Amino acid sequence: MAGQEFAEGFRFPPGFLWGAATAAHQVEGDNRASDWWAAEESGRLPHRSGRACDHLRRYEADFDLARAFGHNAHRLSLEWSRLEPEPGVRDEAAFGHYERVLEALRARGLEPVVTLHHFTAPRWFAERGGWLAADALDRFAAHVDAVVERFGSQIRWWITVNEPTVLAKHGWVTGDWPPFVRGRWDLAFRVIHRLCTAHRRAYRCIHARVPDALVSFAHSIPWIEPCDPSRTLDRLAARLRTIFLVDWCFDRVRESGRRLLDYVAVNYYTRSIVRWRPRGRALLFGVDCHEPHHGPRLFDDLDQELWPEGLLQVLRRCARLGLPVLVTENGIATTDDGLRLAHLRGHLEALARALGEGVELRGYLHWSLMDNFEWAKGTTARFGLAATDFATLERRPRPAMRLLAEVARTGRLAPTGSEVTSA
Ligand code: IFM
């Protein structure tokens, strides 16, 4: 993607949001009242989050780090299970904690981008049937209302729920996340539907109290293409996967003919190349394939392909919804600094190209500020701009963090090869 186009570098628009994204359970530590903590304790998950990155106590130092590296925005989630550890019981200490967290962000010039549900829920919510329980939507709506009542005036950018399709797939199809149900696409789609409905209710609730809020849900959008574009069935598999795992959510958030979205929150990681498989569980969406005619492909430690061109394609596609776009996650699981740098550089170029084509892109939040607790993979998958030493909890900025800092500070993506990446 590099080359001529960026020979002179690229200027990002003023006010562009630069930063990193995190989620409470993955960084805070001691998330004891959550369903994930309960599942970890039960031994059904291979890893325990424990103190994670101890961000609960170290958030100020972490925000200092973000600011020192040029960030002007930060995505975080407010942990529902801390705020409402028992049904209907609001924990004032937890509300006070997040009050201080939001103040700490503001004091450092970091625009908060706040997620209300990022995979974890209170243990009591899960025990009553989680997202499939009859009163699930009312419970979540009441929680959202309490949060908006308290913090509404301090937050402009909201994300209601994170990655409905990912949560549903892991929880009800592959079964490696709570509630550990396998092979139930029917339930997975009910869960996705419910999460989209939860989004709509949260959207209305936030706007009732904060009319100028910007509200979205974060959608995991891979770039999906057919294995062999000349084969009708491969094209059909790619099309069906796109319809069900990407477009369906955008349709579910419609109400009275309009989408309840103020912007599109895109989590982009990878490309899926899909081949039709006439029998078996993956009938509808085909299977991922790796074939020689695709040439050499680079994969990260979670077997996700590094494919910056896909971000450009996804941004073009989202722009067709007629809304501004914010990249709310993008990153790579690797310990290879060179690969991480190439990944970041490639994706920054994709942003530049999208802006050059007129996509209304508002910002870029990298996943993640530091290595953290990567769900069922524990701390084995390293996504951080800063490396975390899980013995000492020291954060050590990586070269990619310096590249992002340079672009964020100058607003300019320099031509390939001229970026500052040394200490
Ligand atoms: O760590 C996750 C995050 O919680 C949701 N999006 C993908 C990330 C990397 O796998």
Image: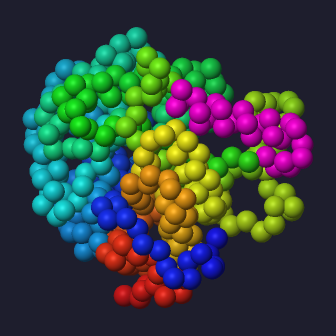
Q: Main secondary structure of the magenta part?
A: helix
Can residue 149 be found in the magenta stretch? no
Residue 97 position in % (x across, y down): 14, 46
235 inside magenta stretch: yes
Query: Which region shows up in magenta?
Result: 226-251
Residue farthest toward the top in the current orientation of the protein: 134
**Residue 364, relative to residue 234: is it above or below?**
below
Left or right side of 157 for 234: right
**Residue at far right of view:** 231
Please tell me which residue is depicted at 37% across the width and 37% down the height of the picture: 262
Q: Is residue 90 left or right of residue 280?
A: left
Closer to us: 271 or 411: 411
Q: Is residue 103 left or right of residue 371?
A: left
Q: Is residue 114 above or below residue 358?
A: above
Quadrant location of residue 290? Answer: bottom right
Residue 37 image offset from top left, x and y in percent: 36, 40
Res. 120 image quadrant: top left
